[in-house]
Image (spheres, coloured by chain):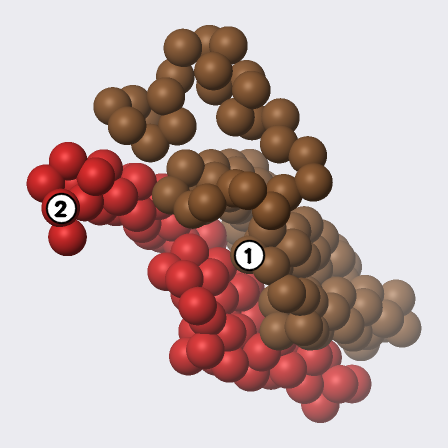
Chain colours: A brown, B red
């Protein structure tokens, strides 16, 4: 096992642990989604890079497909979660809220009669 | 090496379990489940490297796609539930 693959695997696990610590420690839902949604694809990308170096072409192909699916889909899913929380909770305590203005401008009501 | 890598993913999984049990809203539990899924995928990759065996590497591929589908379905459910409560009452 090469040193580079080991280092990348451990770095990926460390980033995943950071995501976990963020999801426990942060105080608001938005901050928790931020920690989980940003760090998760990076963690899998880094760990998958290390695994691809170590496993050869077949393993690298599998890991590449998994990483591509995750990087393409997970930000979209977390964005949908953000929007669902924004539509279903009281947003009075937010410092800045650009989504509610954009939805008002485009004619989309936040939670009344809009469908996705 | 294997202890350190699996330990990092296991710590992420433990944090996800805590948020899954304690999370105040449904969306918090969903994002905790996403983190649990990431921890499982990473552990499978580390396991494949440790045993030098690519047999089970198809599982992270499937998990990535299934996880996205589940998240989207849950978001639709949250928004729809809120709309039904607003129209009909709890």
| Camera-side mark, 2 or 1 | 2
The crowd level at tag 1 (other Cα within 10 Å; few <14, some 14-19, many 20+) is: some
* Residue at the image position 56 percent from the left and 27 percent from the top: A99
Answer left or right for A85 relative to B84: right
x then y, percent, for residue A24: 62, 73
Name the chain under label 1: A
Residue B43 is at least partly visible in this image: no
Q: Secondary structure at mark 1?
A: helix
**Dot 2 and dot 1 residues touching (CB under 8 Å):** no
**Looking at the rendering, in which quadrant would you find the N terminus of chain A?**
bottom right
- Which residue occupies the foreground of this view, B55 or B28? B28
- Give the number of the disc on residue A8: none
- Which residue occupies the foreground of this view, A97 or B30? A97
Q: Whole-Å distance between the Cαs marked 2 and 1?
A: 25 Å
- Give the number of the disc on residue A29: 1
Answer left or right for B90 relative to B59: left
The crowd level at tag 2 (other Cα within 10 Å; few <14, some 14-19, many 20+) is: few
* Residue at the image position 47 percent from the left and 40 percent from the top: A86
Name the chain under label 2: B
- Which residue occupies the foreground of this view, A22 or B4? A22
x then y, percent, for residue B7: 68, 85
Q: Secondary structure at mark 2?
A: loop
Q: Is residue A80 above or below residue A63?
A: above
Residue B87 is at least partly visible in this image: yes
User: Do the residues marked 2 and 1 share a common chain?
Assistant: no
Residue at mark 2: B89
């Amino acid at each position: 096992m090469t040193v580079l693959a080991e280092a990348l695997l451990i770095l990926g696990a460390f980033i995943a642990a950071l995501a976990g610590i963020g999801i426990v420690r942060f105080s608001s839902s938005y901050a928790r989604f931020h920690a989980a949604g940003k760090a998760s694809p990076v963690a899998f990308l880094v760990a998958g890079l290390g695994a691809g170096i170590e496993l050869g072409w077949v393993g690298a192909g599998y890991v590449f497909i998994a990483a591509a699916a995750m990087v393409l889909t997970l930000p979209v899913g977390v964005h949908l979660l953000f929007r669902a929380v924004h539509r279903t909770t009281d947003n009075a305590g937010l410092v800045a809220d650009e989504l509610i203005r954009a939805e008002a401008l485009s004619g989309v009501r936040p939670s009344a009669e809009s469908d996705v | 090496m294997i202890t350190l890598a699996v330990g990092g993913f296991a710590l992420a999984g433990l944090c996800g379990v805590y948020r899954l049990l304690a999370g105040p809203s449904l969306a918090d539990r969903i994002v905790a489940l996403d983190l649990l899924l990431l921890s499982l995928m990473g552990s499978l990759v580390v396991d494949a490297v440790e045993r030098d065996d690519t047999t089970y590497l198809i599982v992270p591929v499937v998990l990535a796609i299934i996880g996205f589908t589940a998240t989207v379905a849950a978001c639709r459910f949250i928004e729809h539930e809120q709309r039904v409560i607003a129209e009909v009452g709890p």
